[in-house]
Image (cartoon, helix red, strand yellow):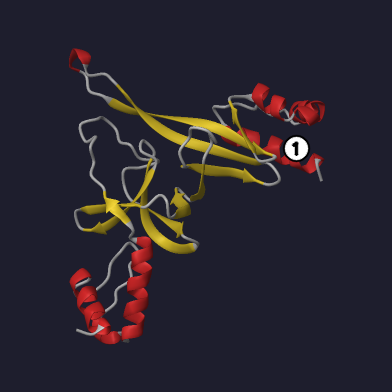
């Protein structure tokens, strides 16, 4: 059997009649040259690289996903190649990205190969990058980019399970977030204005004045409130 024949048979077995992988793209085998089919197979091998996902927490109330339990549109960059209009879920309990593989099956993308991804939800795009917050003990994890300049501001979404199984209650997912500031290649956890001023110690008085004059409320409960302050801090260094 030739290589081309094998690819055609593989293509037909994987996508009988058409291809439908979150991009709403339909391709009939008779309409496409073999070179196009081979290119499509190569791209799918890059994108659909991972393992089958199974929900081990179906008995826990709520869910482990960011924003919604449904797949939402996004993009993902894998080994430097960006795939757009991909249906994704972000499991923030396990810190993994999922995409539909076929009816009834879900693929957990290979985290080692993922560079970054984005999610579009309620007319807003959230961009995520992967890095290690704890350079000694931490694993590579995904962080939402709030601001990216000379200094960078990141938000980490996570979920934990609240054990409520006693007294006839059920366990439940709850969400929490942590803020991180990247300054001069060092990462700092930020829990409020005090932490922010300590990290920006070299411009502390200017930052205090900026917050006061603009009547800003800087709070961990509102991570976006830190963006203007960090942007101003960067402007002082220009």
Query: Horizontally, is 31 left or right of 155 in the view?
Result: left
Asked where in the image residue 50 lies, by quadrant, the reply is: bottom left
Query: Horizontally, is 171 left or right of 157 in the view?
Result: left
Q: Is residue 49 above or below residue 206?
A: below
How dense is the environment of label 1, judged by Cα within 10 Å: few (below 14), some, or many (20 and up)? many
Q: How many marks?
A: 1
Quarter of the image with the N terminus is: bottom left
Report helix, strand or loop for mark 1: helix
Query: Horizontally, is 36 left or right of 11 in the view?
Result: right
The residue identified by callout 1 is 233
- Where does the image place residue 90, in percent across and percent down from the top left? 38, 45
Q: Is residue 209 above or below residue 93?
A: above
Residue 23 visible in the current orientation: no
- Where does the image place residue 221, in percent across and percent down from the top left? 54, 27
- Identify which residue is drawn at 53% across, 36% down: 133
- Identify which residue is drawn at 20% across, 78% down: 9
């Amino acid at each position: 059997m030739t290589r081309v024949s094998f690819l055609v048979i593989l293509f037909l077995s994987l996508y009988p009649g058409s291809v439908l992988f979150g991009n709403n793209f339909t391709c009939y085998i008779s309409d496409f040259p073999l070179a196009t089919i081979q290119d499509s197979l190569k791209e799918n091998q890059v994108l659909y690289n991972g393992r089958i996902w199974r929900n081990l927490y179906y008995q826990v109330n709520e869910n482990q996903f960011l924003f919604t339990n449904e797949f939402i549109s996004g993009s993902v960059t894998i080994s430097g190649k960006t795939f757009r209009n991909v249906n994704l879920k972000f499991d923030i309990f396990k810190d993994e990205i999922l995409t539909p593989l076929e009816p009834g099956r879900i693929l957990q993308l290979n985290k080692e190969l993922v560079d970054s991804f984005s999610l579009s939800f309620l007319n807003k795009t959230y961009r995520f990058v992967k890095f290690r917050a704890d350079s000694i003990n931490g694993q590579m994890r995904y962080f939402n980019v709030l601001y990216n300049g000379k200094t960078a501001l990141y938000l980490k979404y996570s979920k934990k399970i609240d054990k409520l199984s006693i007294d006839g209650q059920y366990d439940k997912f709850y969400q929490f977030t942590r803020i991180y500031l990247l300054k001069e290649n060092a990462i700092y956890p930020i829990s409020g204005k005090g932490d922010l001023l300590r990290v920006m110690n070299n411009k502390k008085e200017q930052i205090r004045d900026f917050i006061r004059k603009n009547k800003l409320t800087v709070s961990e409960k509102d991570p976006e409130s830190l963006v203007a302050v960090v942007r101003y801090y960067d402007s002082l260094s220009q």
